[in-house]
């Protein structure tokens, strides 16, 4: 990748596999990994490119409920390390905890955007209120 010498590329890959807490999976094929491990390998591969921003589109949607936490924990650690992330998610607890801005969209339109505390505690639009009541039981 990017004409990086093999040894350097391998060291970088191991560094990021350690960061996502699965260095012991380095020599496995995707079919030998759980869904959560596959997601974390994908995150590690992306980090090897040294991105300024990471985009996530429903990173937990295809995972078993027991695997969701390990992926979200990895993303929380990235946020704590200062990684800028744009994440499409239905994981409202995660969004509330990690986001510095929440944008709620419906039918391709931005309905509401705010800081997490305001978005979750005092939503402005009726559509946002309905969504939150259905998702969070407000």
Image (cartoon, rainbow, N blue to C red):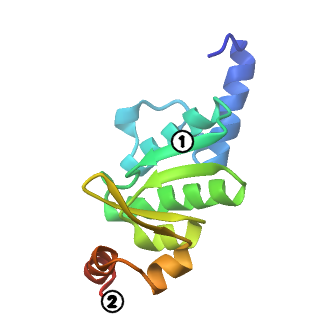
Report if the CB atoms under discs 2 and 1 are less than 8 Å apart.
no
Q: Is residue 94 above or below residue 32?
A: below
Relative side of 50 to 96, left or right = right
Q: Which mark is residue 109?
A: none
Crowd rating for badge 2 (residues with CA inside 10 Å; few <14, some 14–19, many 20+):
few
Quadrant assignment for the N terminus: top right
Q: Position of residue 93 (x, y in %)?
A: 46, 74
Crowd rating for badge 1 (residues with CA inside 10 Å; few <14, some 14–19, many 20+):
many
Residue drawn at point x = 47 percent, y = 76 percent? 119
The quadrant holding residue 138 is bottom left
Q: What is the total number of numbered labels drawn onto the structure image?
A: 2
Which label lies toward us, 2 or 1?
2
Q: Nearer the viewer, residue 96 or 60?
A: 96
Callout 1: SS: helix
Q: Position of residue 131 (x, y in %)?
A: 28, 75
Q: Is residue 92 above or below residue 54?
A: below
How many angstroms separate mark 2 from mark 1 (CA)?
A: 33 Å
Relative side of 19 to 33, left or right = right
Q: Is residue 70 above or below residue 7?
A: below
Callout 2: SS: loop
Of the image marks 2 and 1, the number of the one nearer the N terminus: 1
Disc 1: which residue:
43
Residue drawn at point x = 39 percent, y = 33 percent? 30
Q: Is residue 128 visible?
A: yes
Q: Nearer the viewer, residue 103 or 4?
A: 103
Disc 2: which residue:
138
The quadrant holding residue 24 is top right
Q: Is residue 40 visible?
A: no
Q: Position of residue 50 (x, y in %)?
A: 68, 33
The quadrant holding residue 101 is bottom right
Relative side of 114 to 126, left or right = right
Residue drawn at point x = 58 percent, y = 66 percent? 98
């Amino acid at each position: 990748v990017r004409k990086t010498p093999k040894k350097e590329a391998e060291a970088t890959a191991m560094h990021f596999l350690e960061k996502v807490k699965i260095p012991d999976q380095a020599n496995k094929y995707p079919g030998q990994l759980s869904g959560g491990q596959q997601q974390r390998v994908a995150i590690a591969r992306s980090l090897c490119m040294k991105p300024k921003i990471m985009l996530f589109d429903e990173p937990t949607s295809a995972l078993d409920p027991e695997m969701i936490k390990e992926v979200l924990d990895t993303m929380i650690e990235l946020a704590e390390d200062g990684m800028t992330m744009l994440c499409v998610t239905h994981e409202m607890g995660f969004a509330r905890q990690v986001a510095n801005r929440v944008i709620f969209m419906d039918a391709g339109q931005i309905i509401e955007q705010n800081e997490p505390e305001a978005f979750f505690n005092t939503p402005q639009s009726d559509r946002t209120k309905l969504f939150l009541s259905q998702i969070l039981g407000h």
